[in-house]
Image (cartoon, rainbow, N blue to C red):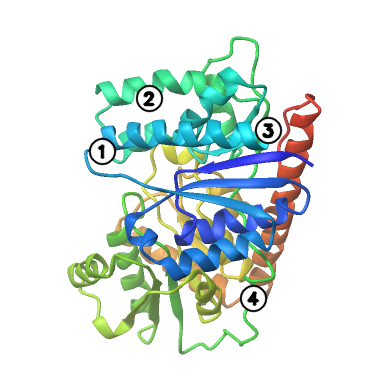
Amino acid sequence: MARVLYISYDGILEPLGQSQIIPYLKRLALDNEIHIISFEKPAELVLKKEIENLRLQLKSHDINWTPMRYHKRLSILATIYDIIRGQVIAIRITKILKTEIVHVRSYIPALIALPLKWFSKTKILFDIRGFWADERVDGKIWPKNGIVYKSVKFLERYLFRSADHVVTLTEASVPKIIDFGYWKNNIPNITVIPTCVDLDRFKPSQIKLTDNKSFIFGYVGSFGTWYMMDETMALFSEILKIRPKAKMIILNRNEHDAIRSSIFRSGLPVDRVEIKKSSYEEVAIQLQRIHAASALIRPCFSKIASAPTKVAEYLACAIPCIGNYGVGDMEKTLESNEIGVILRSFDINSLNIAAQKIIMLSSNPDVRKRCRKIAENHFSLDKAVKAYKSIYLSLLSKQSKGSIYQ
């Protein structure tokens, strides 16, 4: 059993934490002693009942939790402040628990963990979750020639060098990590573990979804910086040309006004699009209604390291989907297994062809069975947890070796 401090700059009260942190840690806690430090948004911290319920839920799995307030105002200074506060708390917890492994989720938690590496024998598992600094540039949040980006890229070298093991989401990102050249001949131990889902929660619909007259197209999650909202609406417009009675369901938490604006710009009939605010528990149920889905992401360098959770959720529910080139292993997953469509251009003709293909795929029972099979083989939460357990054991034994999760 390992004593593990898990640090996340994402809040576990948010949907991402509910789907991509808590399910993993509950299973890992069966064999390990786990303490979580997470940074929660102010809007979440006022939900006293939800916090207490989550604390009790975690406690029932022998997981302790230290929620901290996330600061955003004066962006860079706020992040530095959070890092310093996080370091103080992490050092204190490590001394009390005699932490053996610090499992950090992305770059900010890795910075928080650095002092632990300097002043203790703690092993660091750097779960990178993507190329964070490059994401900020690709998302036009930071200028590439700016001091902030250059400083973070400078620090990135030390984060990777300090890691005893690196986890990345995609096979496509592994050569890029090695090409960073931070290690000379001492390449880090790297394991690929994509974003995974609970296959008992996300499962195929028992309802027959082959009605030739109706067709339901779906989208789950935020749009934000990366997801191509207008192109998604344009794609649904092409679906409507083929299936005039088609409907689109969008499961989204906070961007309803922006989505309605995009619907208006696209000229879509308002009554053809249903926008729902669903909890993590409700998403799997809503997906039961969907024939096919979308995950269009703006292609850029940083997205090579991305594995969208929504794609794993779609496939687990036996839903073929439309994605695009330049995003992690998506092209390999969808096209090589013939369970989806990859867009390489977003012009009307390409969108129309994609619409025709996805309608055809969604009506094929064999395609839907393949979707589920791929989810079982590559996106199973149980397999991911098994991989993390193996890494923990290797770190404890000081024999961590590089591997690729399949």
Q: Which mark is residue 75?
A: 1
Nearer to us of marks 1 and 3 is 3
Quadrant location of the N terminus? top right
Q: Badge 3 is on which residue?
A: 98
Residue 267 position, x and y percent, is 20, 74
As drawn, 320 above or below 103: below
Other-residue count near label 2 (Cα within 10 Å), few / some / many at <14 / 14–19 / ≥20: some
- Going by the numbered disc 4, the residue's amino acid type is Pro
Which is nearer the N-term, disc 3 or disc 4?
Answer: 3
Which is nearer the N-term, disc 2 or disc 4?
Answer: 2
- Going by the numbered disc 3, the residue's amino acid type is Lys
Which of the 4 image quadrants contains residue 186? top right
The answer to whether marks 4 and 1 mark residues whose Cβ atoms lie closer than 8 Å is no
Q: Which mark is residue 119?
A: none
Mark 2 to mark 4 CA distance (whole Å): 42 Å
Asked which secondary structure carries label 1, the reply is helix
Residue at 72% x, 60% y: name it: 376
